[in-house]
């Protein structure tokens, strides 16, 4: 019995010792299809799409990582970054920018991304450049998080150079895309009819997923009928302000507030009046503005006077929740070091900067609500949480 036990023990040791070798073999075999591409000169040679058809989606993603990785890009996607760290040639560079890519490399990434888009079972963030002339159906769109839908809708406009200064985090996201070139003269009329249909399909999916009855662009349907609180339920304060101003925008009002002006000038339906005077509103439109203002005021009063409920926060992006939290401070005159945030709150008539602001000015309920919102932010989805590329 002793000899048999010793033999089994030795075999066990041999098997344990073989595990690292086996893992190494599996790792090498796992990336075998990419070996030839590690030695490919993407800066001077053009990849052919038919050469990539046999690669899996994961291999295509890693191949994309190779092109960027040759310049040291550090990815937030763990599987790409782990793969790059396993390569002897990879030298991470925290200062990487897309500016180091030459035209040939950009063309190669385009080829890789287009093959990826063809292999996706549903349309994914990053694919919209390949759907400029293809109608996306709800079935093709599939299931996505709210953040992904937000990115995808904006991506259609970003292809044409739209800036998203009203959403700094979204602007940062697109500035990290190798294909993005912002334009100070973005014109929404350059969107094709198909692109507008695709935006509408994504917007409808977002509205359905958030259980909203009203969304941006819907106010045209309320020019002759009254809003109700039930219709406004679930909208953030930021969204409510845009909808309130959409009533004016439909009548051609010119806006002085920077972020509101930027937003409406990017809408294909917006046709500003030649003068800066106030447009004529119908009685129903005036009442709808009053209904939205009353709803906004009630939401704000609840933030300062009642404990915030999960229902109020549910569905908000991280960025929207952060705006709501900072508004509690702004109502007491806090001066923000973030320039965009300071400019945003300074655009409201109620904001009065208080250089002597301190948290002692906050009520017990406000402090509790700030904690609640922060807890939500720690789990909230960011508008930037989408695919790398």
Image (tube, helix red, strand yellow):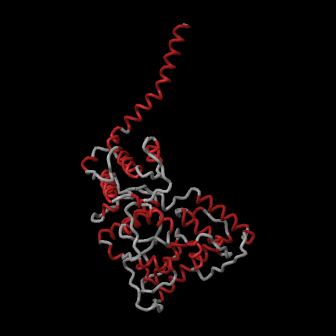
Q: Residue at x 44, y 73 (%)?
A: 216
Q: Residue at x 48, y 91 (%)?
A: 278
Total labels: the figure holds 0
Q: Residue at x 49, y 81 (%)?
A: 245
Residues 1 and 126: in front is: 126
> Can residue 150 be seen here?
no
| Residue 249 picture location, percent across and down | 44, 83
Q: Residue at x 50, y 86 (%)?
A: 286
For the C terminus, the image quarter is bottom left
Q: Is residue 97 left or right of residue 298?
A: left
Q: Is residue 55 left or right of residue 3?
A: left
Q: Quadrant of residue 55?
A: top left
For the N terminus, the image quarter is top right
| Residue 262 picture location, percent across and down | 46, 77
Vertical arrangement, residue 300 with respect to residue 61, above or below:
below
| Residue 380 picture location, percent across and down | 55, 58
Vertical arrangement, residue 41 with respect to residue 264, above or below:
above
> Can residue 37 be seen here?
yes
Vertical arrangement, residue 368 with respect to residue 49, above or below:
below
């Amino acid at each position: 019995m002793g000899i048999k036990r010793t033999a089994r023990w030795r075999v066990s040791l041999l098997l344990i010792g073989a595990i690292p070798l086996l893992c190494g073999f599996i790792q090498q075999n796992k990336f075998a299809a990419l070996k030839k591409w590690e030695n490919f000169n993407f800066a001077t040679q053009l990849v052919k799409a038919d050469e990539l058809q046999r690669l899996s989606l994961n291999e295509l993603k890693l191949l994309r990582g190779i092109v960027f990785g040759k310049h040291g890009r550090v990815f937030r996607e763990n599987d790409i970054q782990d793969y790059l760290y396993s390569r002897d040639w990879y030298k991470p560079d925290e200062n990487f920018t897309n500016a180091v890519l030459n035209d040939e490399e950009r063309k190669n990434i385009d080829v890789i991304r287009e093959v990826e888009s063809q292999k996706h079972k549903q349309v994914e963030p990053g694919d919209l450049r390949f759907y400029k002339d293809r109608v996306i159906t709800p079935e093709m769109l599939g299931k996505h998080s709210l953040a992904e839908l937000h990115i995808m809708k904006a991506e259609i406009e970003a292809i044409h150079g739209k800036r998203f200064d009203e959403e700094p985090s979204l602007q940062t996201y697109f500035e990290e895309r190798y294909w993005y070139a912002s334009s100070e003269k973005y014109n929404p009329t350059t969107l094709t009819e198909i692109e507008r249909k695709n935006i509408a399909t994504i917007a409808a999916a977002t509205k359905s997923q958030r259980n909203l009855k009203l969304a941006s662009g819907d106010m045209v349907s309320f020019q002759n009928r009254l809003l109700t609180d039930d219709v406004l339920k679930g909208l953030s304060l930021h969204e409510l302000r845009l909808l309130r101003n959409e009533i004016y925008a439909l009548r051609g009002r010119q806006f002085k507030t920077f972020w509101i002006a930027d937003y409406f000038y990017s809408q294909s339906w917006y046709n500003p009046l030649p003068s800066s005077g106030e447009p004529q509103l119908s009685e129903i439109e005036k009442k709808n503005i009053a209904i939205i203002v009353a709803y906004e005021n009630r939401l704000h009063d609840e933030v300062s006077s009642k404990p915030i409920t999960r229902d109020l926060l549910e569905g908000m992006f991280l960025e929207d929740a952060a705006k709501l939290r900072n508004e509690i401070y702004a109502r007491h005159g806090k001066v923000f070091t973030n320039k965009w945030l300071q400019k945003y709150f300074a655009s409201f008539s109620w904001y009065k900067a208080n250089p002597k602001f301190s948290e002692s000015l906050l009520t017990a309920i406000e402090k509790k609500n700030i904690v609640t919102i922060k807890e939500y932010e720690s789990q909230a989805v960011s508008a930037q949480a989408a695919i790398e590329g």
